[in-house]
Image (cartoon, grey):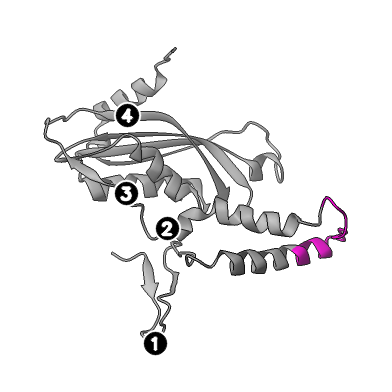
Amino acid sequence: MADRVKLDDDNRNGETVAAHGDNTIPGGDDERIVGAVAQHMAAIMSELNLDLDDPNYKRTPERVAKMYLEMFHGLREGAEPAVTTFPNDEGYHHMVIEREIPFYSMCAHHFVPFYGHAHIAYIPESEVVGLSKLPRILEFYAKRPQMQERLTEQVAEFLWSRLKPQGVMVVIEARHLCVEMRGVKKAGALTTTSALRGCFADRLVREEFLALLRRQTSW
């Protein structure tokens, strides 16, 4: 299923337009993008009556543009992360959990950060994935304008569709600066979202996962 829609055949550049929020940034176009975004940022600052000749502001538009390229690099990489899976030759059919994976993303509604930890679990069937790839999958979907609910579902759906495991569950806990810095201004408010597939719909399987999350580990 394509998350991106090709433009007409006359488009020689292979550009894409957004479908379901998964547009891509063309590679090799950094200089143009940074210049265009910096120009718009300078216009915003001017509207706020900021002195662009002030040494503290002089390079700010360019810095912001470069920051956006970094923060949104998930858009550049394509419709899904490149992750290699391996045959489950050992026949392992119990829970695999990676806890407290840190992430940073940008709220799609206000373009301010939200950040926290993800807990990812799956029960393999015929395929497994390297443990380092679970943070990689999370990072890919986090590095774009996001909603926490969508991020949680995207990670779960990727593992479910690629690994075809017995089950997947993802829990994300995050703090949103759009809640803490503006609006209701509730510092420290924590938002928790979850997504599950397959055997995690079973209460006992789900409770095993949640019980393991509650365990305290000291190193």
Q: Secondary structure at mark 4?
A: strand
| Quadrant of res 204 | top left
Q: Residue at x 16, y 29 (%)?
A: 92
The magenta stretch spans which residues? 42-56
Magenta stretch, main secondary structure, is loop
Looking at the image, is mark 3 or mark 1 earlier in the sequence? 1
- From the image, state whether disc 4 or disc 3 is nearer to you: 4
Q: Which residue is mark 2?
A: 77
Looking at the image, is mark 2 or mark 4 earlier in the sequence? 2
Q: How far separated are the C-alphas under marks 1 and 4?
A: 47 Å
- Amino acid under disc 2: Glu
The stretch drawn in magenta includes residue 51: yes
| Quadrant of res 79 | bottom left
- Amino acid under disc 3: Glu
Q: Residue at x 32, y 66 (%)?
A: 2
The C terminus, quarter of image: top left
Looking at the image, is mark 3 or mark 2 earlier in the sequence? 2
The N terminus, quarter of image: bottom left
The answer to whether residue 58 is left or right of residue 186 is: right
